[in-house]
Amino acid sequence: MGEEIEVIDPAGFLLTVRLDAVSPERVEGTVVAEKPHAPEPVAKISIAVANLPAPALELVLSRCTEAGAFAFYVFQADRSVAQGAKLPRWRTICREAAMLATRLRIPDVSALASLDDVLKVNEYPMMLVRDAPTRLAAMAEPRDVTLVVGPEGGWTDRELALVQVKAGLGPRNMRADTAALVGLSVALAARE
């Protein structure tokens, strides 16, 4: 006993707690320090990502949760290689990443059938496209958006026609998991 741990208070504090008693049923301690803790971004940036093979999708969920994503929408794009939804697994990944990053909230994760369904539930979608005329870094409004990240095979013409606002991350071709994290980071930085 006497070991100190950090505990997140949902009221917005990071507490240092000295452990007094630990058993399988109960943990008791004394708060020895507290400091304000506001890790959540002001902007609510969601990630709508085409269903990817498990390692790449799990990387998107974990790293984007750590970086501050508000929510995730995993959908079947026309060219998605991966099939099926593993919501319990995906939610566990987000919960563990949120704990690691000492976040106050865990992002919601939803599985949707198509890009059409993503657009029905998101007010401000922005599709990430390599050759978009406008860079994401130059788009600070609206504050709360959903970044739409494509499948490994790229967007079809039908999907490109569905989303009016397109943004680019530069001239390089990126893997979908890289584009999601870079896009989130750029969007958050442009809105701070």
Image (cartoon, rainbow, N blue to C red):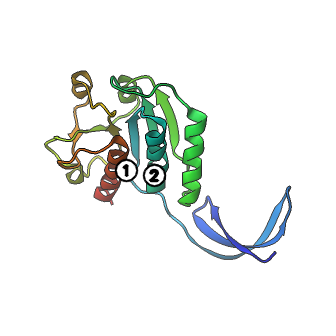
The residue carrying pointer 1 sits among few (fewer than 14), some (14 to 19) or many (20 or more) residues within 10 Å by Cα, namely many
Q: Is residue 155 left or right of residue 66?
A: left
> Which residue corresponds to the image point at 23% horizontal and 50% vertical from the top-left?
139
Q: Which residue is mark 2?
A: 63
- Could you tell me which quadrant the N terminus lies in? bottom right
> Which residue corresponds to the image point at 68% horizontal and 70% vertical from the top-left?
5
Q: Secondary structure at mark 2?
A: helix
Q: Residue furthest left?
A: 133
How much space separates mark 2 and mark 1, taking CA atoms? 7 Å
Considering only order in the chain, which callout, 1 or 2, is on the residue closer to the N terminus? 2
For the residues bearing labels 2 and 1, Cβ distance under 8 angstroms = yes
Q: What amino acid type is highlighted by mark number 1?
A: Leu
Q: Is residue 17 above or below residue 39?
A: below
Q: What amino acid type is highlighted by mark number 2?
A: Arg
Q: Secondary structure at mark 1?
A: helix
Q: Position of residue 154 (x, y in %)?
A: 27, 32
